[in-house]
Image (cartoon, rainbow, N blue to C red):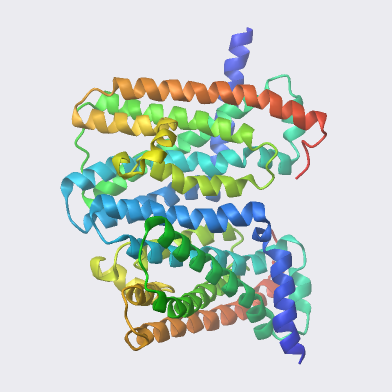
Amino acid sequence: MTSTRIFFVGGLMSYRALFGWMNPWIFIPSLLVSPVCQILLFAYIGRSAGVGDDEFYVIGNALNYAAIPCMFAMTFTIGGERFAQTLGLVLATPARRIPLFLGRSLPVILNGWFVAMFGVVVGSLLLDAHIPGSAWPLIALVVAVGSLASTGLGLVMGALNLVYRDGATMGNVLFLVLLIFTGTNVALDDLPGWMAAIGRCLPLSHAIEATRMLGDGATWGAVQGLVGTEALIGLAYVAVGLATIRLFEHLSRAGATLDQI
Amino acid sequence: MTGLGARLRQQLVCFWLQLKILMFSPFEGFLAVLFPLMFATSALLVYRVNNDPDAMLYAGIGAAAMGIWTSQTVSATTLVQRERRAGTLELVVAAPTSFSLVLLPITCAMATIGLYSVVATILWDWWVFDIALHVEDWPVFVLSILMATITIALFGFLLSVSAVRYRTSWALGAALEYPGWLLCGFVIPLDLLPDALRPVSWALAPTWAVEGMRAAAAGESAWADLAVCGAVGLAYAALAGWLGVRLINAARRDATLALS
């Protein structure tokens, strides 16, 4: 019961307290305007280069941008606590770590899902990209799986933030890695082999591919393998993140470096 | 020291001090170079799919200048907020040197980081994408890059004074990054944009500087583009100077300068 309360109530409270982007003056430009502008930028680059269609760039960039709230919010669950001088209190509690940190990830996944879906919907409207009506429910599901996977990577970042303080720079670098390697703007088949191989181990690659297939009219049966792989990758990152948090928590206690800013 | 000499010294000292601070900042130094470099890489990967050397060269020239824009957007919009957080904003405003003359060398230092980004991107394009710049008129090409740097610095100057009372201005700066890359035609021809957006592109000085870079590379005259670029940049400076005085006076009158 306590773990359930920590998961839901603790997660929501932590999100409201630490996620500064809830301010509309930040949320609207950062998480609504920017993804749409990124979609438009690459859609026009695609038109100029004569590569792909608008739908390709709408889906790729909308999902790619979900990584921003997912990764940064999870990083801030560590960095924000440290900044508020409450990290020691959080880690000194007897609360189990799995509900403590996974509870914080649930609102993050929902927010990432919303940002990506907003990008897909508004990008499609602005560029007149046609996505069949029947595909939308499955697209919503695949985007949720992609957000979960990105949040898993965010959990790893949050753990690294225990020992590397500059979470903002680290988050941006990882966002760029996802932009280049996950087939956001160039299909994995058109990337050099080594880049595609890295991309297939990262969150979002399979979700982007599955969403594009759904947008082209594919059935659930055609994409379920990709969605399953994306979910497995996400869960693997979550597991690595939780294990890394435990390890770095121990190291930072031993070195008395927990609250260093 | 004469008034002009003292003013020049203040500009140089402030520029050099801020440049050193920026160079050691992972976010405003390292990331200001890496972020546009990776977006340029992503754009060039798209262009590379069709393997058209002319299109690659076209995109490569514009991509080189993307970093100058990035060096200003987030950094310039958060300039005043950083002073506020550091507790130095009141000191800067109360100093006998006008507020505008304090901000200007800071935005110039930011643009210098952008200039470094240009060199890094040109080398990166050559190394990774095998894009060798064929430039017919190197002096005018370099002048176009310098014009882009100076006018974007002036745009940053305008942004920084405009955001004096916007407490979460970094979000505005981040949101300006992609529109700037799109509207200034760094990696796409402006003809592709909807007609309604053309006047916005014309009002952005880098649009003309990038046109100048491409004209110089092709051996055509770039002077008309550079003249418009300079005129638009001066308009930014005049507007920023005018706004700076009024916004700061309003913030002092309402006692809101230090609120964060």
Whether residue B24 is visible, yes or no, is: no
Task: Determine the residue positioned at 68% across, 36% down.
Answer: B164
The image quadrant where one finds the C terminus of chain B is top right
Q: Quadrant of residue A178?
A: bottom left
Quadrant for the N terminus of chain B in the image: top right
Number of on-image labels = 0
Residue drawn at point x = 62 percent, y = 42 percent: B78
Does residue A1 sit above or below B133 in this rendering? below
Extreme-front residue of the structure: A133
> Does residue B36 lie above or below A139 as drawn?
above
Q: Is A43 above or below relative to A96?
A: above
In the image, is B5 to the left or to the right of B216? right
Q: Quadrant of residue B230?
A: top left
Residue A66 drawn at (x, y percent): 50, 66
Query: Where does residue A115 sit, x and y in percent of width and height?
Result: 53, 65
| Depth check, front residue: B206 or B96 | B206
Q: Position of residue A150 (x, y in %)?
A: 50, 72
For image coordinates 30% across by 71% down, the residue present is A196
- Is A99 rendered above or below residue A84? below
Residue toward you, A171 or B259: B259
Name the residue at the bottom extreme. A1
Query: x%, y% of residue A111?
Result: 59, 69
**Residue, x 45% and y 48% (percent of image)?**
B178
